[in-house]
């Protein structure tokens, strides 16, 4: 009797509906088709991949991801297929699974080089531009703190030095708030 219940429970659990998760190819191919990407995008991707994470290639100030609507299966032309495979081969990092827009593909490599251990929850919730800016800010906060300490060690500060000190302190506080808002899993 126990064996019969065990078999039935196993069969019942196998029949449960599974959520649809598009493959990496489906995701990238959907972006290629939706945004009519072409060979020019590959050239932009190559230029983006060769730049440092801190280059001034900020795209639009978005912090939240837009939802990506994908068809249940991919039908593409030969050119779209080649472009999709070239993008996947060129980027080749796990963050590519979380992209929802072409600009995120461009930022994917730089973000991965800057911090290869971001959680899937953060990658799924925030636009890669906001994550890249947060990582850059997190990297520069200690440098700014050292600048403040050097200014304080100088002793007598004139009016310009004091105003610079206040500006740097405000910059650090703003950077910390931004990093906390973006990189903390409970942040919105």
Image: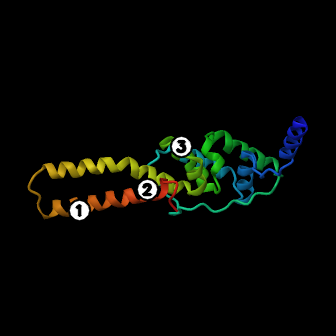
Residue 99 drawn at (x, y percent) = 63, 52
Toward the viewer: 31 or 16? 16
Displayed quadrant of residue 14 = top right
Q: Position of residue 155 (x, y in %)?
A: 10, 52
Sequence-earlier tag: 3 or 1 = 3
Q: Which residue is mark 2?
A: 180
Is residue 139 visible in the rendered structure shown here? yes
Label drawn at residue 112 = 3
Q: CA distance from mark 3 to mark 2?
A: 19 Å
Q: Earlier in the sequence, mark 1 or mark 2?
A: 1
From the image, state whether disc 3 or disc 2 is nearer to you: 2
Q: What residue sits 87% from the left and 36% below the top?
A: 2
Q: Secondary structure at mark 3?
A: helix
Which disc number belongs to residue 82?
none
Query: Is the C-beta separation of discs 1 and 2 under 8 Å?
Result: no
Task: Point out the image quarter for the N terminus.
Answer: top right
Please, what secondary structure does the residue beneath circle 2 have?
Answer: helix
**71, 40: nearer the viewer:** 71
Residue 56 percent location from the top left of the image: 45, 54
Disc marking residue 166: 1
- Disc on the earlier residue, 3 or 2: 3
Image coordinates for residue 29, horizontal then vertical, percent: 74, 51
Instruction: Name the side, left or right, on which 177 lies relative to 60.
Output: left
């Amino acid at each position: 009797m126990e064996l019969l219940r065990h078999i039935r429970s196993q069969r019942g659990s196998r029949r449960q509906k599974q959520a649809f998760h598009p493959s990496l190819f489906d995701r990238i191919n959907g972006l290629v088709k939706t945004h009519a990407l072409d060979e020019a995008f590959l050239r932009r991707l190559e230029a983006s991949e060769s730049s440092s994470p801190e280059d001034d290639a900020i795209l639009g100030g978005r912090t939240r991801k837009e939802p990506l609507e994908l068809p249940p299966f991919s039908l593409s032309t030969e050119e779209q297929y080649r472009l999709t495979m070239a993008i996947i081969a060129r980027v080749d990092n796990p963050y590519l699974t979380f992209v929802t827009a072409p600009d995120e593909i461009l930022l994917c490599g730089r973000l991965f080089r800057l911090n290869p251990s971001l959680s899937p929850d953060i990658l799924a919730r925030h636009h890669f531009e906001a994550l890249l800016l947060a990582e850059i800010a997190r990297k520069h906060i200690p440098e700014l703190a050292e600048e403040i300490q050097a200014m304080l060690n100088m002793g007598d500060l004139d009016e310009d030095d004091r105003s610079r000190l206040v500006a740097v302190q405000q910059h650090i506080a703003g950077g910390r708030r931004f990093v906390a808002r973006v990189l903390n899993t409970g942040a919105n």
